Image (cartoon, helix red, strand yellow):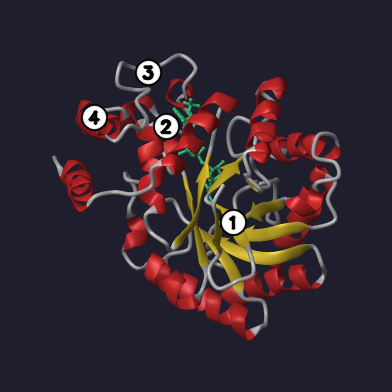
């Protein structure tokens, strides 16, 4: 596993990290996700990404991960970089959502309990809150670090201007922002319009989430919607997104990947890692086989100029 420096910090991240948003909840099979986690760690994935609301139901991914931490991973805490977040709806009433100091403090307290941890390595504000002063949210993050409940702080889903403001506040408070977590893939290129430049200028690392666009950037939907796929559940990935137009692009990308000796999933991950500003690619995996397949992206990270131009042409076609 190659490790990349996270911005201008002391932290090295595995080029591929594993997220527990889907596939690690109460409704998933323990033997399957346990194997995924053990395979990940055995292959050098030291970074596991969680959030208060991952499941379903919310909280269950942290509970399940806590169980593995207490058993299989016991004795390895210091080899692991564990993150969690708060920012989306977690519990009823006015204090279980968004970005108040009350919510962030209470939520992290709950997350630590669920995972049986004294501290997490990274605590993120999960999304910007238009109604809470940025200073309040950032001061809560700083105090969480000062209390020893997180080693570093991160931000997710902040647009470039707000990310810059937040970074300046955090730096002035002596708790620099370590990392930013944006949605970034061949199908969602928003971070290229300013965010990656801000992060580089501020010395903040970038970790790209949903790098396979929840599975769209694989060959799985070329022949229809498989029964066990995320799109078949019609929850986070709707079947209406699988249009003939998109599948034509996916087919062309898949052909290029095959020519490169890769699966489309591997090419999609390699494509993100070509940019040095991307410290890590945060994949999801429904089982260890998918994870092992994705890890093979690391065997071929280089792209010719012609390949990159062809990818851009395919993505822009109407
Ligand atoms: P991906 O884009 O990697 O999608 C994962 C899905 O892709 C899997 O469930 C599986 O779909 C499919 N897949 C994965 N690997 C392969 C493979 N090799 N071959 C074929 N199919 C494959 O990421 P996610 O959307 O799951 O997000 C990853 C992580 O990012 C999350 O766990 C979380 O940590 C983070 N995240 C952060 C957010 C934020 O707001 N900060 C929001 C969303 C995610 P299937 O189940 O259909 O087989």
Specify which label sits upstream in the sequence, 4 or 1. Answer: 1
Tell which tag, 3 or 4, sits nearer the viewer: 4
Specify which label sits upstream in the sequence, 1 or 3. Answer: 1
Q: Report which residue position mark 1 lands on.
A: 13
Few, some or many residues within 10 Å of mark 4 (<14, 14–19, 20+): some
Q: How far apart are the two marked residues, 2 and 3, measured between alpha carbons? A: 11 Å
Q: In this view, does 212 lie above or below 27?
A: below
Q: How far apart are the two marked residues, 1 and 2, measured between alpha carbons? A: 23 Å
Classify mark 1: helix, strand or loop: strand
Q: Report which residue position mark 4 lands on.
A: 255
Specify which label sits upstream in the sequence, 2 or 3. Answer: 2
Q: Do the residues labelled 1 and 3 touch (CB within 8 Å)?
A: no
Tell which tag, 1 or 3, sits nearer the viewer: 1
Q: Do the residues labelled 3 and 4 touch (CB within 8 Å)?
A: no
Specify which label sits upstream in the sequence, 1 or 2. Answer: 1
Q: How far apart are the two marked residues, 1 and 3, measured between alpha carbons? A: 34 Å
Q: Report which residue position mark 2 lands on.
A: 215
Tell which tag, 1 or 2, sits nearer the viewer: 1
Residue drawn where x is 38% and y is 47% of the image? 301
Ligand 1 near label 2 (Cβ, under 8 Å)? yes
Residue 306: image location, x then y, percent: 17, 48
Figure label count: 4
Specify which label sits upstream in the sequence, 2 or 4. Answer: 2
Disc on res. 126? none
Quadrant that contains the C terminus: top left
Instruction: Please state if 303 lies on the left or on the right of 200 as rendered.
Output: left
Residue drawn where x is 34% and y is 56% of the image? 190
């Amino acid at each position: 596993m190659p490790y990349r420096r996270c911005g201008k910090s002391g932290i090295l991240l595995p080029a591929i990290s594993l997220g527990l948003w889907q596939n690690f909840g109460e409704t998933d099979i323990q033997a399957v996700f346990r194997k995924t986690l053990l395979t990940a760690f055995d292959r050098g994935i030291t970074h596991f990404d969680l959030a208060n609301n991952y499941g379903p139901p919310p909280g269950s991914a942290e509970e399940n991960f806590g169980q593995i931490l207490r058993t299989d991973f016991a004795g390895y805490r210091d080899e692991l970089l564990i993150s969690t977040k708060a920012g989306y709806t977690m519990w009823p009433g006015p204090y279980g959502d968004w970005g108040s100091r009350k919510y962030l403090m209470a939520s992290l307290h709950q997350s630590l309990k669920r995972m049986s941890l004294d501290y997490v390595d990274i605590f993120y504000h999960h999304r910007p809150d238009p109604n809470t002063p940025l200073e309040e949210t950032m001061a809560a993050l700083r105090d969480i670090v000062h209390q020893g409940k997180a080693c570093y702080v991160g931000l997710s889903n902040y647009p470039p201007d707000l990310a810059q403001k937040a970074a300046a506040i955090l730096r002035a408070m002596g708790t620099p922002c370590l990392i930013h977590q944006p949605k970034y893939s061949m199908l969602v290129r928003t971070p290229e319009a300013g965010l990656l430049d801000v992060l580089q200028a501020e010395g903040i690392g970038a970790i790209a989430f949903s790098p396979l666009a929840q599975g769209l950037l694989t060959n799985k939907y070329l022949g229809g919607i498989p029964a066990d796929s995320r799109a078949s559940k019609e929850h986070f990935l709707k079947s209406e997104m699988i249009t003939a137009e998109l599948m034509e692009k996916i087919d062309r990308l898949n052909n290029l990947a095959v020519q490169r000796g890769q699966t489309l999933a591997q090419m999609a991950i390699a494509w993100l890692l070509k940019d040095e500003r991307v410290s890590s690619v945060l994949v999801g995996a429904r089982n260890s086989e998918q994870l092992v397949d994705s890890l093979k992206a690391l065997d071929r990270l280089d792209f010719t100029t012609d390949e990159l131009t062809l990818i851009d042409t395919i993505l822009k076609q109407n």
